[in-house]
Image (cartoon, rainbow, N blue to C red):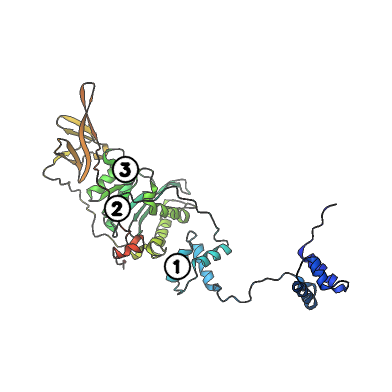
Amino acid sequence: MPWTNVTYMEEINRFVILARSGRFTVTELCEQFGISRKTGYKHLERYAALGLAGLQPRSHRPHHSPQRTDEAIEALILAERRLHRTWGPKKLQAVLARKHAIEQPPACSTIAEILRRHGQSVRRRRRPGAFVAGNDGLTVPTQPNHVWTVDFKGWFTLGNRERCDPLTVCDRYSHYLLACTARPNQQFKSTLQAFRALMRHHGLPEIIRCDLGSPFASNGLGRLSSLSLWWIEQGIEVEFMRPASPQENGSHERMHRDLKAEAIQPPSANLAAQQRRFERWRHTYNHDRPHEALDQQTPADFYQASTRRLGEGDKPLVYPRDQEVKVISSSGHLAHEGRNYHVGDAFAGKRVGLRLNSAGRTELYFANVHLGHLAYDAEGGRFTPAAYVAPLRLPPAPLRRPPAAAGRAGREQAPSPDPLP
C-alpha cells in the first residue's frame, strides 16, 4: 500500500472541519496538528468570514512600497538595455542621469534586479583572470593622441560569403575609437590607405602601440614591417607588445568584445552594409556609451584632434653628421666595406645610417631607431657577413599614476582636455 501524500491545504481544511464539528477543542487540535492556537483561530476566523476561499494562501507582499522604482524609470531602463544589450547597471545608471536627466537614478543593485526580473540579465560566476594586467614599461598616456592602439579584429564571413577584417584604432588616453574600418584583407597597401585617410582627419599620434602580427610587424630587424617603417618616417614611435600578451592592450581587446556582440553578430550582407553598421556603432561608443575608466563620461568628452599633421610628401630622412648614410637595395641588402648584409625586404629603397661606436662596432639606424650592429660570424675558417638585432637596453620607465582617462586619481595629475565643439 503506497504512502498517502497530504498537501498543506488539505491539512488546513481537515483542521477547520474537525474544529467546527464540536468533538474536539481548539487546543487539542492545535497540539495534534502541530500549530499554535493563534494560527488555529486565524484559520477559523477566515473560514467564518469567507468560507473555503478564505483558507487559500495569501501573499505577504506589502500593500504599499514607497521605495519601489517608478514604472516610467523602469521602462527607460529596459528600453536602454534592449538598445545596448552589453551595457550593465553602471552604464545604465549613468545614462539615466546623463541622457534622461533623472536627478536620483536607482542604485546599480536595483537596476540589476530589474534586469533579472524581466529576463534581461542572468547571474554568472566571474572567472578568474588568466593573465595579470601590468604596465611592464609601456608608455602611460598623459593627453589625447599620445598613444594610439591599433589591431585587427578577428576576421569573419559576411552574408555574401566575402571576408571582412575590421581594422580598429583607438586613442589610449580618452578611449576614443578613431576608426573601425571593414577591410577585405590585412594586406599592407589597403591598410596603409586606411591609415593615410585616418591621419588626414585626426592628425598624427606620438606613439602607436600594436602587437607582433602582420602587417604591423615582421620577423626582420627591429620587428619592423613596411607599415611600421612608414609610421617612423612620419615621426611616430612604434611600441610593440610582448608576444601572446593581449593584457597589455586590455582596453582595446575589451572594445573588441563589445564590437563583436553589438555590430558583428549576425554579420551584414556585404562589406558596404557592414561598414555603415560599424559607423553607427562607433558613434554610439564615442558619444553615448559611458566609460567606467572615465568616471562614466563618454570618450568624446575627452578627445580632441592632434595638431601634428600628416606629411603627404616623401621627404628623405636626415641623419646626424656622425652617421654614414646608405640606401638599401631593392632586394633588401646593405653594402658596406665590401660585404653584403641582408637587412630585410621591408627596408628596400630606404635610407639608413651607420655609426662607428667607441667599442669599434658599426651601429645600424633607421631614423632614430637603433636596429642593432653589424657583426661577423666565423664558420669553416672564413667570415660570413650577418646582421642581427642588438636592442637598446633602456632602464624601465618609472610607474606613474594613471591619467585622467584611466581613473579619478589621474585627474589631479593631468587636466582634462576640452571636448570637441
Q: Residue furthest top?
A: 380
Kind of residue at badge 3:
Ala
Local secondary structure at mark 1: helix
Q: Residues within 10 Å of mark 2 (few under 14, many from 20)?
A: some
Label 1 belongs to which residue? 95
- The answer to whether the residue labelled 2 contacts the one labelled 1, judged by CB atoms less than 8 Å apart, is no
Q: Position of residue 110 (x, y in %)?
A: 53, 67
Q: Nearer the viewer, residue 139 or 149?
A: 139
Label 2 belongs to which residue? 139
Residue 330 vs residue 27: left or right? Answer: left
Q: Residues within 10 Å of mark 1 (few under 14, many from 20)?
A: many
Kind of residue at badge 2:
Thr
Q: Position of residue 8 (x, y in %)?
A: 76, 64
| Residue 139 versus residue 18 in the image, above or below | above
Q: Residue furthest left?
A: 321
Local secondary structure at mark 3: loop
Q: Quadrant of residue 363?
A: top left
Kind of residue at badge 1:
Val
Local secondary structure at mark 2: loop
- The answer to whether the residue labelled 3 contacts the one labelled 2, judged by CB atoms less than 8 Å apart, is no
Image quadrant where one finds the C terminus = bottom left
Q: Earlier in the sequence, mark 3 or mark 1?
A: 1
- Which mark is on residue 270? none
Residue at x 22%, y 48% (from the top left corner) = 233
The CA distance from mark 3 to mark 2 is 19 Å
Instruction: Note whether residue 183 is visible.
Output: no
Q: Residues within 10 Å of mark 3 (few under 14, many from 20)?
A: many
Q: Earlier in the sequence, mark 3 or mark 2?
A: 2
Q: Quadrant of residue 306?
A: bottom left
Label 3 belongs to which residue? 217
The CA distance from mark 3 to mark 1 is 40 Å
| Residue 85 versus residue 313 in the image, above or below | below
